[in-house]
Image (tube, helix red, strand yellow):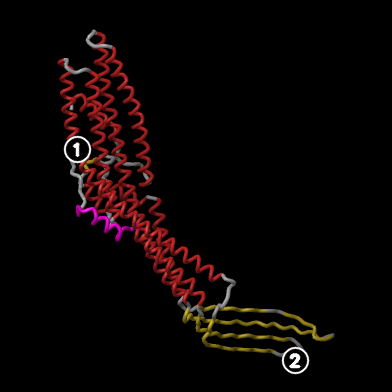
Amino acid sequence: MPRTLLTAFALAAGALLAAPAAVGANLGEVYNLARSNDAKLAAAREAYRASRERLPQGRAGLLPNLSLSASYFDSRSDASPGVVTNTEPYGYRLLLVQPLYRKQNLETFEQAKIQVLLGEQQLRLAEQDVLLRTASAYFDVLQAEDNLATAQAQKAAFAEQLAQARKSFEVGAATITDTHEAQARFDLTTAQEIAALNDLEIKRRALEKIIGSEAPRLARLAEGAAMPLPEPSNMESWVKQAEEDSLGVATFRSSFELARREVARQRGGYLPTVDLQASYADNRNTSTNLAGTDIDTRSSQIGVVLGWNLFEGGATDSRVREAVANQERARYDLDDARRQSRLDARQGFLGVMSGDAQTRALGQALVSSEAQLKSTKLGLEVGVRTRVDLLNAQQQYFSTQRDLAAARYGTLLAGLRLKAAAGILGENDLKSLDALLRE
């Protein structure tokens, strides 16, 4: 790279990356901020806490139920002319019901277990999602910074060529066409710089939304860092693992099991119920009639009660049909999730492999573009190349540099998405990427 271009690029990048923090935050540190502050993940945690309460609620349908009822009345009646009777009946009743057989309650308890499992799976899916969103936002900021630095360096290079074209035109060593060409490239790059500034601001705000605070200075990808490749290197192995272990598939599998249990629960409405009941009652009646009679009754009972809802106007039949339809919907959702997991695994695997190949090709193209730029500048000095040739060489060099950075970030993200599709993405994967970053 010519020294002037290298200097311009370094100055632009240094001005852009300056921040109050002395050391750039790596991906793992930014992810820790996201785990503590991301609103979606916090909502998922509360949803999981709520789902855990389904288990004691479902268990309650199998445990004894104790109820207390009490009453008090004050009544007055005229039995015959001149005879008035006041009565004050009061009492209480304790009732204990222990379900012995209630098919619907049994299925509700089994559903509660599945709902807790589903809540846990959804929380893990949310944790995986925040990891992917953090990594994507992190690399989006780095790419936006690269785009801005490239635009600024390109603008500085074109400004230099514009100044030289004007000077050459003034002394009669070049035509006005060279000046116009350089001016057009400079103006276009100025517009690109404005767009890059706006894009960087948006990308930083997107990262701040996830971490809940001002975006810190970020560690950058080291030059020449080798792209990690999938292990094993067989795509079908990843596809098979994704179909079995994907968190998305697991949640839909639990949803299907929940729907299947709902069909059984609704069909339980056709079956009888058997309860063990025990009660104790104490009723008293104080009378103020002429006889002054008081009645005090105490009673206790224990026995087995059989209940059978024979007809509800077709409501049970309707609820069963509804549950069966929801079960079929859950079956199709599960099938779609499996297909999507296979597609995600293939896309992730191919993204890593093609991204690695593209990175190596663009790396070589950057070396070639730099050599071309140097030779074109030398050719301009000896008169065998035009200024337009130099502008084209400069633009090709900067475009290749920008594309190389984008390919590297895309390859790393494809690797994370591949592991997410296979259900094995975790914090250790971020640590392996941190090893590729420099502060």
Q: Secondary structure at mark 2?
A: loop
Magenta part, dominant SS: helix
Q: Is residue 106 magenta?
A: no
- Residue pointed to by mark 2: 291
Residue 14 placed where, x, y %?
A: 25, 32
Q: Quadrant of residue 52?
A: bottom left
**As drawn, 272 above or below 211:** below
Q: Quadrant of residue 214?
A: top left
Tell me what residue is drawn at x 24 percent, y 22 percent: 391
130 lies left or right of 267: left
Going by the numbered disc 1, the residue's amino acid type is: Ala
Q: Earlier in the sequence, mark 1 or mark 2?
A: 2
3 lies left or right of 187: left
The magenta segment is 231-248
**Residue 17 can be seen in this image:** no
Residue 328 placed where, x, y %?
A: 43, 63
Answer few, some or many: residues within 10 Å of disc 1's Cα (few below 14, many 20 plus, some between 14 and 19).
few
Number of marks in picture: 2
Q: Nearer the viewer, mark 1 or mark 2?
A: 1
Q: Is residue 246 magenta?
A: yes
Q: Nearer the viewer, residue 253 or 159?
A: 253
Q: Residue furthest bottom?
A: 291
- Residue pointed to by mark 1: 361
Image quarter where the N terminus lies is top left
**Residue 391 can be seen in this image:** yes
Residue 388 placed where, x, y %?
A: 24, 19
Image quarter where the C terminus lies is top left
Are dots 1 and 2 in contact, CB under 8 Å? Answer: no
**As drawn, 310 above or below 216:** below
Tell me what residue is drawn at x 43 percent, y 72 percent: 109
Q: Secondary structure at mark 1?
A: helix
